[in-house]
Amino acid sequence: MKSIKEVTPIKSDDPFVILKHENALFDYPLHFHNEYELNLISNFKGSRTVGDSFEKCDETDLTLLGPELKHIWKSESIISNAQVVTIQFQEHFLHSKIMSYAVSKDIKKLLELSKCGISFLNPTKDLIIEKIATIKGNTDFKSFLTFLEILHILSTSKDIKVLSSPPSANYNQNRESRRISLITNYIKNNYDSEIKLSKIAEMVNMSESAFSHYFKKRTSHSFTSYLQDYRLGVVTKLLTETDMSINEISCKAGFNSLSNFNRAFKKKHNISPKEFKLNYDQEVSK
């Protein structure tokens, strides 16, 4: 499904912009932009699509979206009482001087993770609602401090859900480990071919058992599950952005059999690839 690039109103010398919409109709098509975006939507009933994720939403929805992550909300009501508050800030904020300080390490991780999209639940959601209500504008220094406080609260929250898979989000997380970076780059460039654990372990001069332990400690995933999740992310990207057949997508993503592919996909998404594509297309084209 095609998406359009939105030009946002933020200026080069703005720390952020805050936009408020009453009775929002959610008639903007599937889109993306270069900026980070924090969205607070209240009095809402409908659906949210972020990357390859789509979910039903009710009442209040709080999300943080990274640059170039496609997204759309759809309301179930023709007449809307929904209120939307959007805070947008520039992509280079992640690489600004303030993010290089040790006290900003949690916010930096948050912004990296937001490239896959993050939704927040209570009690974080209620706390952020209170903070956003005190922001007067982007030229008020106290409001700027509140903006930073909001990012800090979000960065330490446990009430989070990551929304989209990395390939669908064009997500390329910075990693501290040179070995992990070497491995993830190799997967990115060779996921469509056979990748053996022995080959990967040899690349980083480790035994298979030592590498397996090291990789899981660093990523919280086994190498096998990480590789499969990456391939499934490629699958959802192709399902949502191309008209390739299911069999073509399975081969393109590196699965060695269609039955293994269907089984892995259904285990992750609880529906078949065909049903996933149909549901996605219906959600973004309503």
Image (tube, rainbow, N blue to C red):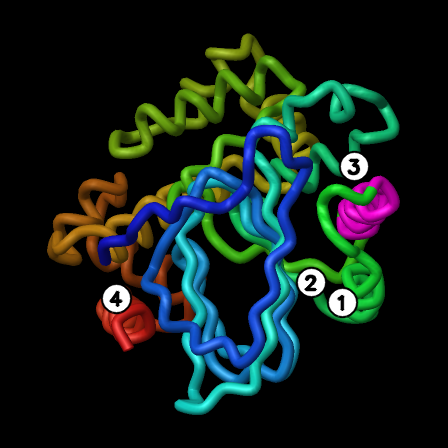
**Within 10 angstroms of label 3, few (less than 14), some, or many (20 or more) residues?**
some
Task: Name the residue tied to disc 3.
Answer: 106
Across and down, in percent, residue 42 comes to 64, 77
Residue at 53 percent of width and 57 percent of height = 163
CA distance for labels 3 and 4: 35 Å
Residue at 46 percent of width and 49 percent of height = 165
CA distance for labels 4 and 1: 31 Å
Tell me where residue 63 sits by quadrant: bottom right
Tell me where residue 219 sits by quadrant: top right
The correct choice, above or below, for 223 with respect to 283 in the image is above
For the question of whether residue 107 can be seen, the reply is yes
CA distance for labels 4 and 2: 26 Å
* Quadrant into which the C terminus falls: bottom left
Across and down, in percent, residue 39 comes to 60, 60
Asked if labels 2 and 1 touch by Cβ distance under 8 angstroms, the answer is yes
Task: Name the residue tied to disc 2.
Answer: 120
For the question of whether residue 156 can be seen, the reply is no
CA distance for labels 3 and 2: 16 Å
The mark lying in front, picked from 4 and 1, is: 1
Residue type at the position of mark 2: Phe
Across and down, in percent, residue 1 comes to 23, 58
Task: Name the residue tied to disc 4.
Answer: 277
Q: How many marks?
A: 4
Sequence-earlier tag: 4 or 2: 2
Sequence-earlier tag: 1 or 2: 2
Between 77 and 275, the one lying in front of the other is 77
In the displayed orientation, state which residue is furthest to the front: 139
Task: Name the residue tied to disc 1.
Answer: 125
Q: State the SS at label 1.
A: helix
**Within 10 angstroms of label 1, few (less than 14), some, or many (20 or more) residues?**
many
Sequence-earlier tag: 3 or 2: 3
- In the figure, is residue 179 to the left or right of 108? left
